[in-house]
Amino acid sequence: MNLSLVDPFVLAQDCPEVITGRLRSGHSTSIRFSHRGDLLASGRHDGIVVVFDIETNGVARKLRGHTRQIQSLSWSTNDRFLLSAGQDWKCVLWDLKDGSRVRTVRFESAIFIAELHPKNHMIFAAALFEDQPVLVDMSAEVPVKHMLPTAPRRSQTEREKATEKQAAQDAKQTTTVTIFTPSADHILAGTNKGWLNIIDTRTHEVMYSYRVTNSLIVLIRMTHSGRDVVLNSSDRIIRTFLLPDLSDPNLDFDMLELKVQHKFQDLVQRLSWNHVTFSSAGDYVAATTYMNHHVYIWERGQGSLVKILEGTKEELSVLEWHPFRPFVAAIGVDSGRVWLWSILQPQRWSALAPDFVEVEENVEYIEKEDEFDIQPLEELHKRRLDQEDEEVDVLTIDPVKTNAQHEPGEFRMPVLLDIEASDSEDEIVAVGAGQFRRRSPGAGKEYMNDDEVGVSGDEVRRANGSTASGTKRRRA
C-alpha cells in the first residue's frame, strides 16, 4: 500500500541525496549491513556490538563479549551469525537467535580485519598486525588456525633473478586486508607493500600476485557478483578492477593480467580516503575522506564524480551502502553517530482514489446537486456491513528484494521488548542511580542550532549539569 504512494520516478533513482536520519547507541567505530538489509550491526568503542533495526531505527540487540574497540564486523549468508573482531586480540562469533557466543578465537597479535566464509559460518579469514594472515576453522571446540602466505608469487624468471634484498623485503611484508570471493574458492589479500594476492582457499597457496601500488592497501571490497573489485590504498588513489571468473576450471593464472579500470582521486586537494564501498548494483563507488565531512560518489561507467553528500559537520570514517536500496550509512569520527543518507519520497495520495486530484493552489469547488443529500440509515448500515466483509491480509509478509548471491533464508532475528536492549540511548535518560526513563517528546530541542541536526541524550545531560552514571548532582 505504501509503495503505491511513492512516485515511480523516485523509485528509479539509485543514488542517495540528503540526510534522512541518524542512529546513536554509544560511540560507533564500525558498521555493516546484513545481507537482507533490514539490520545494521554497529561495533562500539567500548567493545559492545549493537544491532539496529533499519525500519524503526531502534536497537534490536546488544552483544557484550569484547573489552576493547570493535575493528570489523561480518555477517553470515543467512544473517543469523555475526563475526566481530576487536582490539582485544580476539574474534567472537555470535548467534543472533539468542545473542549467545558460539565461538571465541584469541590471537597473539592485533587484528586488522576478519571476514566470514560465504558458505560456512564456522570458517573465517583474518589479517593480523605484523603476523601472517590466518584461515580459522571453528567447527571443533578448539579452533584450528591455518597460516596463509603473504609473500607475492613471482614468475620463474623473477625468482631466478631475485636478490637477497628482494627476498628479505618479501619476507617482511604484512597482509593488511583479506576478503573471500563470493564462491569462497579464493581469498583476495592486500599487503603493506601494495601487492594484491589471490590465495586458493583449499590449498592455501598464492595463485596470482599483482603489484597495484607501492603504498599500503587499506581496504578491498567486491560486488555481489565477484567480478568487480575496489581497492583503497594510502597513496590517496581509489582503484577499481575487473576480475575474471576465478572459479572457472579452465582459468590459467599464469596468463592472468589484471588491469586498473578506473582511478578515483582528488587532484586539487589531494584528499586521503578513509573508507570505500560499492553501491548495491556496483554502478557507483562511494568514499569518505580524511579531515573532511563529505561523502564522494563516482559513477563507474565514465569514472566521473556525480554527487557529494553533505549535511554533517564532522569527519566521517566507515561507510556502508545498503544491499539493494539507495541508502548510505557513515560513522562520524567525533560523535560516534551513524548518519543516514537516502532519498526523500514525496507521497502521491492520488494513487489511493482515482477521483482524487492534487492541486497546486486553492480552486473553487462546485458540488453536485445530490452530493450532500441525506442518505437513509438503512443504506448507510448496509454499506458498512459490506465493507466489514472485505478480508484484509495483515499476516502475509511480502518477499524482500535481495541479491541472488546471498539468499537470506528463513531466519528472522527475534525482537526484544526489553527497554535497555531495544531502545536507542538517545531515547533513554538517566534520572538516578540505576533508574531510567524515556525521553519526553521534543526534549533537547532547545539545544539545537543551525549547525547540528540534533543532540544526543548524553549532550542534553551534560548541558543540564548531570552525568549519565546517575551520581549525586549539586545545585548551582
Image: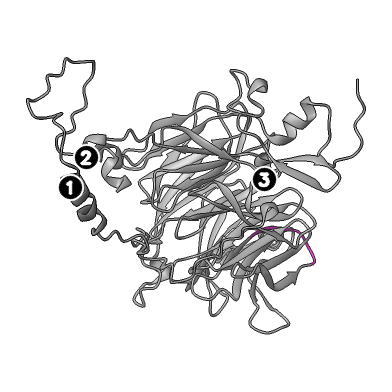
Q: Nearer the viewer, residue 48 or 437?
A: 437
The Cα atoms of the two marked residues, 3 and 1, are separated by 56 Å
Question: Does dot 3 land on a helix, a strand or a loop?
Answer: loop
Give the residue type at disc 3: Ser
User: Would you say residue 110 sits in the magenta stretch?
Assistant: yes
The Cα atoms of the two marked residues, 3 and 2, are separated by 38 Å
| Residue 440 appears in the rendering | yes
Q: Quadrant of residue 408?
A: bottom left
Residue 345 placement (x, y as % from top left): 35, 36
Give the residue type at disc 1: Glu
Q: Nearer the viewer, residue 330 or 413?
A: 413
Residue under numbered circle 2: 351
**Pointer 2 or 1: first along the chain:** 2
The label on residue 401 is: none
What segment carries the magenta color?
108-113
Q: Nearer the viewer, mark 2 or mark 1?
A: 1
Residue under numbered circle 1: 378
**Pointer 3 or 2: first along the chain:** 3
Q: Nearer the viewer, mark 3 or mark 1?
A: 1
